[in-house]
Every structure is written in structure tokens, then in C-alpha cells.
């Protein structure tokens, strides 16, 4: 009899422990890991993983855009707009990185008023890479840049196949100091199908890849990273000075590491599996 009572008490003891543990678990708060504060708090747009048409079908375009092929890229997030003077000078002030030359006159760039929202130019490929690394991002690959610019339907320009107009792109102009470049995002008629701004004209954009005019002929069709080596890097998108043939979503420019011009800037990307940063909006491509 005593043994039976002992066994029953033991079972109730175990049950009590389980109930108590359950209550403890239920009442314990769950804390999410705090998001990392962005040093470059610009809106970013998620580009979903999947295929798109890269390049141009011969005889259209130029030979270095041939052949057109279906390319698969992983999901990534891209800056909605080009890096501005304001954002770049914050990077300079924080890191001590050298300031780019002032294309608007004498004095240092930071002293010029009214240019804060213009895209930064006169930056080298190394400058662009350093900025993106500081922002916990990176330069886009050529394939990522082109998918963000044209979507998945093979369009010629970010907005579709219609010819460029001044309401869609800042291009084919002469230099008129601080009236040349437009404030980023000020021509919504030129948005890409994902809503990315200024991917035609305004400022050309450095990307990660080495340039090879024959690369497309034998390039990987999944996440191409560009040639393993080269002499110059790819520049995309055309600038305020480019003719309309140079501001297509497929046109490929190039420049040396130390190239600095009044028309070359950049934007950054981040792989979507990089955790702990601000959320990016996810966009589905719009039709032509």
C-alpha cells in the first residue's frame, strides 16, 4: 500500500514539473535580434530570383551585347536610386576616404550648395567599391544590374521599347555645371519595371565585372560574375552626355580603375540572404 502511494506521488511530482516547465516556457518573452542600423539608409528594392533575357539579338545593338540568352540570377536587393553627393560625403566624413574632385567649380565638393541630391560623379571603381563595402553592400554584377534595369521581358529601355524623351531620361546634353545632372529619382517616367530609378542616363554606373567584348558567347547562364581577369571594368546605363544608343538597358561601357568623369557614378546591391539589415520592398516587374 505504501509502495502504491509512493508511485502515485512520484507520477504527480513529474506531472507537476512538466506543468511548471510549460508555464515557464509560455511566459518567457521571445526577443527578436535587433536590426543593424543602416549607415546608408536609402530605400532598396528586392529583385526576385529567376530568369531574364540578357543581351541583344543580332543584328540589333552592338557586338559585345550578343548573343541574347536566358540568364538566371539569385534574389538580391538594389538601391532604388544612385548614390548622391549627400550620401557619399557622409561616407567621406565617417571614414576619411578621399573626396572626389569638384566638377562644379573651385573649392571642395562638400562646400557646394544645392547639389546634395544629385548623383555623385568623378568616382573611381575603387571609390565605388569602398563605399558599398562601408554600407555593408557591394557593387552589382553586370547581370544583376541588367535584370533590375529591364525586368524579364527583354525590353530595350527600362520603361519599354519607346524612344527616349527628356521626361524619361537625362541624356544627350552638354555640361552646364550644376544644371546638368538631375536630382535622383526626379524622372519617374523612366523607372524600370521594378521601380528602380535613373537606370538610363544621368550618371553611368560602375558594376563589379571585368569587361570582355566576347564574354557573352561562353558566359555561365546562372549568376555570371564576369571574366576572371581583365584590364577595364564594366560601366552601365549611360550618362547625361550619352546618345540614346548608349542608354539602353543592354549597352555596355567600360573604364579603367582610375577613371573619373563628370558622368560616372554608381549604386549598391545586397544579397537577400544577408540578415540583420533594413527590409527592402519586393517588386514584381510591370509590363511594357
Image: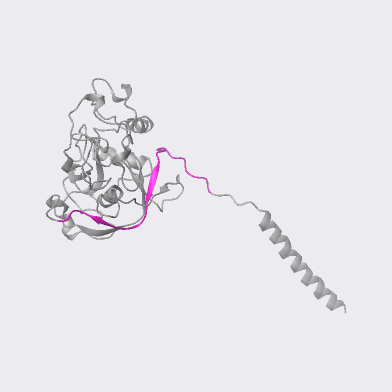
Reply above or below: 258 against 30: above
Is 38 in the magenta? Answer: yes
Magenta span contains residue 168:
no
Q: Quadrant of residue 13?
A: bottom right
Toward the right, the furthest residue is 1
Q: At which x and y percent is residue 162? A: 22, 45
Q: How many marks?
A: 0
Q: In this rendering, does residue 255 appear at all?
A: no
Residue 202: x and y, percent? 25, 35
In the rendered image of this protein, does residue 96 appear above or below residue 149?
Answer: above
Coordinates of residue 137 in the picture (x, y in percent): 36, 45
192 sits to left or right of 212: right
| Residue 253 visible here | yes
Residue that protrudes farthest toward the bottom in the picture: 1
Q: Residue at x 11, y 54 (%)?
A: 59
Q: What's drawn in magenta, residue-wise? A: 33-57
Q: Nearer the viewer, residue 27 or 286?
A: 286
User: Which quarter of the figure has residue 206?
Assistant: top left
Query: Is most of the magenta stretch helix, strand or loop?
Result: loop
| Picture residue at 25% right of the left edge, 56% below the top | 53
Amino acid at each position: 500500500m505504501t509502495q502504491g502511494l509512493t508511485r502515485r506521488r512520484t507520477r504527480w511530482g513529474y506531472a507537476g514539473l512538466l506543468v511548471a516547465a510549460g508555464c515557464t516556457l509560455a511566459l518567457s518573452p521571445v526577443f527578436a535580434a535587433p536590426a543593424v542600423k543602416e549607415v546608408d539608409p536609402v530605400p532598396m528594392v528586392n529583385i526576385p530570383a529567376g530568369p531574364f533575357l540578357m543581351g541583344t539579338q543580332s543584328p540589333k545593338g552592338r557586338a559585345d551585347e550578343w548573343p541574347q540568352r536566358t540568364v538566371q540570377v539569385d534574389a538580391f536587393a538594389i538601391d532604388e536610386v544612385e548614390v548622391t553627393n549627400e550620401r557619399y560625403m557622409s561616407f567621406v566624413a565617417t571614414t576619411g576616404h578621399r573626396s572626389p574632385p569638384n566638377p562644379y567649380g573651385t573649392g571642395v565638393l562638400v562646400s557646394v550648395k544645392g547639389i546634395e541630391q544629385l548623383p555623385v560623379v568623378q568616382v573611381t571603381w575603387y571609390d565605388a567599391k569602398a563605399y558599398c563595402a562601408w554600407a555593408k553592400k557591394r557593387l552589382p554584377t553586370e547581370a544583376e544590374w541588367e535584370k533590375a534595369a529591364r525586368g524579364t521581358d527583354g525590353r530595350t529601355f527600362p520603361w519599354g521599347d519607346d524612344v527616349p524623351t527628356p521626361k524619361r531620361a537625362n541624356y544627350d546634353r552638354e555640361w552646364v555645371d550644376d544644371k546638368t545632372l538631375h536630382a535622383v529619382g526626379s524622372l519617374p517616367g523612366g523607372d524600370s519595371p521594378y521601380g528602380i530609378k535613373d537606370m538610363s542616363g544621368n550618371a553611368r554606373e560602375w558594376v563589379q565585372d571585368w569587361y570582355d567584348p566576347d564574354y557573352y558567347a561562353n558566359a555561365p547562364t546562372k549568376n555570371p560574375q564576369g571574366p576572371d581577369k581583365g584590364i577595364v571594368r564594366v560601366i552601365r546605363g549611360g550618362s547625361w552626355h550619352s546618345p540614346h544608343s548608349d542608354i539602353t538597358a543592354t549597352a555596355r561601357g567600360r573604364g579603367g580603375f582610375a577613371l573619373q568623369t563628370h558622368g560616372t557614378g554608381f549604386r549598391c546591391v545586397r544579397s537577400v540572404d544577408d540578415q540583420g539589415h533594413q527590409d527592402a520592398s519586393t517588386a514584381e516587374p510591370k509590363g511594357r
